[in-house]
Amino acid sequence: MGTPEFAIPSLDILRKAGYDIVGVVTAPDRPSGRGQKLRPSAIKSYAVEHQIPVLQPVKLRDPEFLSALKALQPDLAVVVAFRMLPKLVWRIPGIGTLNLHAALLPDYRGAAPINWVLINGESQTGVSTFMIDEKIDTGGILLQQTVEIPDNWTAGDLHDCLMQEGARLVLKTVEGLETQTIQPVAQDHSQFFHPAPKIYKEDCKINWNRPAGELYHFIRGLSPYPTAWTHLNGNMFKLFRASRLLDRVGDASPGQISITNSPVQFRVACKDYWLSIEEVQLAGKKRMTTVDFLRGYKGILERLES
């Protein structure tokens, strides 16, 4: 989970600290909404507002883009929530190119560290700055900041926290490189335990035969995006929030639904315990609490399909 918004606090804090931002590189405008009109990324909108030149290459090896980037004569490039850069690009700045990563490297290398940290039930993560090299997330580490994860946080909550912590770390890193008070330190590759690859739609399907504790972390780790899902009466049913219950399922089979009235609970049987579902979205409907969902849903609630 790396949104374009993730880069804005880093850009903003560098600009306000007095650094000369000579340009921003971001993705081309993409169609969005019902009318599929081309809309700029959040970082482009920020750059335009503050009169910062914007480059939007379709291909990063495009000679025209490379020429335009060189013409900016950057001393240092800062990469936040962007795709992998070819060597032709990251070697252009005089000092080099640093990357902000939303985890404590060398662990959780990959495209979706925020999601995977929560899916795996970690209680601690952080942000790292490092110098880019030929491989993914393997360059020398510059600075790191540890962050504790409250048990009820979703990926969205952690994203917003790391976005701000990351911006502060980027500023400290740029200051350290400018004053030559920090140097990259090679990663200890033996401490790489958990990959964090990109997550696709099929990866988000819930298997109710798994323990409730695992599914609790699975749901929070995919909320609000790309979102854990299951099927309810043949329709896609997205789950955004849940809570663990201490009640064992007994004779109930995985995926079986139980509705209680006092308090109102939408409970689903897992391999061992019940899971209380708190926020949902049925295909074609808006996201809502289960209380509101149960008030308006007219179908038969028997089982969620793995």
Image: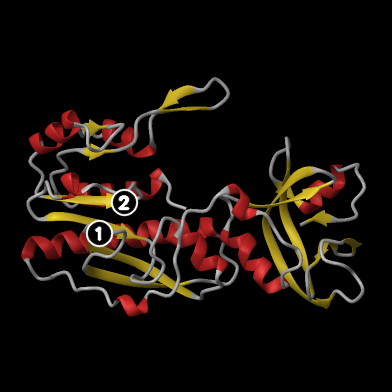
Where does residue 187 sit, x and y in percent of width and height?
26, 73
Residue 135 numbered mark, or none: none
User: Camera-side residue: 17 or 300?
Assistant: 300
Residue 268: image quadrant is bottom right
- Side of 241 where 121 appears, left or right: left
Where does residue 258 sit, x and y in percent of width and height?
89, 62
Residue 299: image quadrant is top right
The amino acid marked with disc number 1 is Val
Whole-Å distance between the Cαs marked 2 and 1?
10 Å
Q: Could you tell me which residue is drawn at 39 percent across and 71 percent down?
A: 107
- Side of 302 where 206 appears, left or right: left
- SS at circle 2: strand
Given contact means CB atoms under 8 Å apart, are the residues at marks 2 and 1 in contact? yes
What residue is pinned by disc 1? 170
Count of residue discs: 2
User: Camera-side residue: 252 or 225?
Assistant: 252
Which quadrant holds the C terminus? bottom right
Q: Is residue 248 above or below residue 195?
A: below
How busy is the neighbourhood of tag 1: few (under 14 within 10 Å), some, or many (20 plus)? many
User: Camera-side residue: 65 or 75?
Assistant: 65
How busy is the neighbourhood of tag 2: few (under 14 within 10 Å), some, or many (20 plus)? many
Q: Could you tell me which residue is drawn at 42 percent across and 51 percent down?
A: 2
- SS at circle 1: helix
Residue 80 numbered mark, or none: 2
**N-terminal-most mark, 2 or 1:** 2
